[in-house]
Image (cartoon, coloured by chain):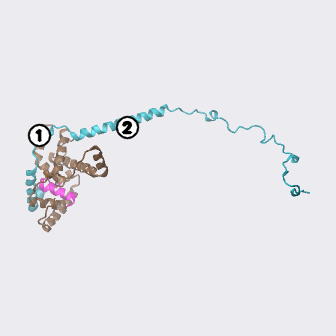
Amino acid sequence: MERETAEQLEALHPDAFGWALHCCGGDHSRAEDVLQNAYLKAASDRVVHSGASSFKTWWFGVIRLTAHEEFRRLRYRESLLGKLLAQLTGDSHDPRPSPAHKIDLDTQTLRTREALAQLPARQAEVLHLVFYQDLSISEAATLMNISLGSARQHYERGKARLRTLLQTHPVLTHES
Amino acid sequence: MNPDLQPDHDLRELFAHQRRSDHEQAPAWNPGVLRAPAKHVRSRRSAWLPITATAAACVLGSLFWLQEEPKPPADLAQALPEFFAPQGEPLFASLDTAPGSMPSDSLLPAYLNIQLP
């Protein structure tokens, strides 16, 4: 790996973790796994930035794809066949986050996260990318692999819905 | 600054707060991770290798078996025995079929023998 790429990855690391956290529904343990696998992909040159988009857009696309792969793997493990194979091989994996990874978050962060969780996935994604990651709607559309018009629609609807949710439930309790 | 979020100060502050909170919880940067070997890829490759080798061995074995199987002769009519060859004689030729020698009901009592005119 080139030194310049490594430096860019290091600079993006905190935001990349925030994006991985969003892709994993707020699960810290899974977010760390996803980010680790994404770094391994970059280290083994399985993913290479071609320059077609900005480095941040490309890297966040890699993380998003890795999170989807991880989700499919998790769903397979939770399936009957996966559980059977895990029992046969003795590889038991609990998909739930371990108690050590339960993070004490403040009320406002929890409220935002829970409100975002109630939005459709595309709307939550575009809002996170624009407001949290400071990307433009065009960059978010590229990352999400959708058209600009579709991204704008998700953005506008997501904003309106998020405001409604935050006004309806100003303080939400976090049970997990 | 991103021009898309200028009029949405409320949401911007909300996400900025979440961002600060997440950054505090983020794991520390570990440069060693970029030099580590790809664990998942290697395990997948090692799992697929014996499966591919077994499949290839099965295909080669079946091809070899198909080549070794004896082929039937070209002219089956000559190779098979003749089951229904014509004998040249009528069936039951040795039996006497003259009217006087036909079997009669000799075991019946005499009064039951009907004499036809």
Which three-letter amino acid code belongs to the residue tagged 2? Answer: Ala
Disc marking residue B31: 1
Q: Which residues, given as a range, are shown in magenta? A: A119-138
Percent x, y of residue B77:
63, 35
- Does B99 sit left or right of A130 as displayed? right
Q: Are marks 2 and 1 on the same chain?
A: yes
Is B67 rendered above or below residue A132?
A: above
Q: Is tag 2's residue or tag 1's residue first in the polypeptide sequence?
A: 1
Which three-letter amino acid code belongs to the residue tagged 1? Answer: Pro
- Does A110 sit left or right of A77 as displayed? left
- Quadrant in which the N terminus of chain B is drawn: bottom left
Q: Is residue A131 magenta?
A: yes
The secondary structure type at the circle numbered 1 is helix
Q: Nearest the camera: A112 or A175?
A: A175
Q: Which mark is in front, 2 or 1?
A: 2
Q: Is residue B12 magenta?
A: no
Percent x, y of residue B95:
82, 42
Q: Colour of chain A?
A: brown
- In this view of the protein, can residue B1 be seen by the observer? no
- In this view of the protein, can residue A99 be seen by the observer? yes
Task: Place residue B114 in its image quadrant.
Answer: bottom right
- For image coordinates 18% across by 61% down, the residue present is A158
Task: Output the chain of dot 2.
Answer: B
Q: Colour of chain B?
A: cyan
